[in-house]
Amino acid sequence: MVTTRNFRVHWNFNDPQATERVFQELIASTSSPIEKLLLQTQVARTYGLRDQFDQAKQVLDAIEAQSHGLECTLVDAAELKVRLHLERGRMLRSSKKPEEARPEFLKAFQVAQDNKMDELAIDAIHMIALVVNANEALTWTQRGFELAKESEDLNARNWDAALANNIGWTYHDQGEFNKALEYWKIALTAYERIGKADNIRIAKWMIARGYRSLKQHDQALEILHELEKNPSSDGYVFEELGENYLALGQADKTKPYFAKAYSLLCDDKYVEADRLNRMQTLSK
């Protein structure tokens, strides 16, 4: 087992621009050529998350060109190769080219697996699952989940939470709500072990979502009202409160929740227009 660099500790996925500045400072602070190239892969990722795909490609092409003939350990060379494939794949997926992204993720997985880099292998698996059909996605994600549980690398081990969450969503999309809830409870336990408050809050929301699908609205509302008390409560919590009260036929309680949800989520690029229109309509 090879422990690779934990770049995730430097990431704020809600602010890629600030994250780029962090990585640029890290690049400036090291004299190691291989370290600079590895860090630059993360700069490329920040561009991809901002839909600046030309800049992302330029950075990745420059890294690849500079990597030829670079003096470094075999392990570092392998890690750079994995990260180049991963970030090219992420860039292609974000630019709506999943078919081109898939071979990049598969190459990243193969190199990581060959070099016993569990954390990067799991990262690649998680990305493969996003560019294949639902059945393949479930198989890949379960494979990653098992690898995470068995790994001696703590960074790899901590992937169990996100993968359990993803497995839960796949089962939920297939209408297997009990299985979804089972995995979301596993995810909550894992996030509590890891100890990140935001992820714990989201995991509790997921469990409430599972209860709503099972029409167990009282259980869902108990969780959601606890989440509502949190100052960092977001529009998704209010939306879910509205949906549960709507399902219970308590229309008088739904409007303020949908209104709050809409006001908080109307500028969220990850929320579909139809969903926003529904919130707005139900708030009136």
Image: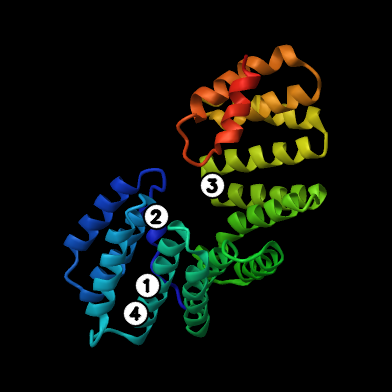
Q: Which residue is located at x 38 percent, y 47 percent?
A: 12
Identity, as a three-letter code, of the amino acid under mark 2: Val
Q: Mark 1: which secondary structure? A: helix
* Residue at the spot of label 3: 195
Real-space CA distance between mark 3 and mark 4, rounded to the nearest whole angstrom: 30 Å
Cβ atoms at labels 3 and 4 below 8 Å apart: no
Sort mark 2 into few (<14), some (14-19) or many (20+) by Cα contacts within 10 Å: few
The x and y percentages for residue 104 are 46, 74
Screen quadrant of the C terminus: top right
Q: Which residue is located at x 64 percent, y 69 percent?
A: 140
Real-space CA distance between mark 1 and mark 4, rounded to the nearest whole angstrom: 12 Å
Identity, as a three-letter code, of the amino acid under mark 3: Gly
Real-space CA distance between mark 3 and mark 1, rounded to the nearest whole angstrom: 30 Å
Q: Which residue is situated farthest in the top direction here?
A: 252
The x and y percentages for residue 231 are 50, 25
Q: Mark 4: which secondary structure? A: helix
Q: Does residue 212 sit above or below 150 in this rendering? A: above
* Residue at the spot of label 2: 9
Q: Please state which of residues 95 and 168 is positioned toward the viewer in this rendering.
A: 95
The x and y percentages for residue 133 are 66, 64
Q: Which residue is located at x 45 percent, y 57 percent?
A: 94
Cβ atoms at labels 3 and 1 below 8 Å apart: no
Q: Mark 3: which secondary structure? A: loop
Label 3 or label 2, whichever lies nearer to me, is 2
* Residue at the spot of label 4: 76
Identity, as a three-letter code, of the amino acid under mark 4: Asp
Instruction: Identify the mark nearer the N-term, 3 or 2.
Output: 2
Instruction: Identify the mark nearer the N-term, 2 or 1.
Output: 2
Q: Mark 2: which secondary structure? A: helix
* Residue at the spot of label 1: 84
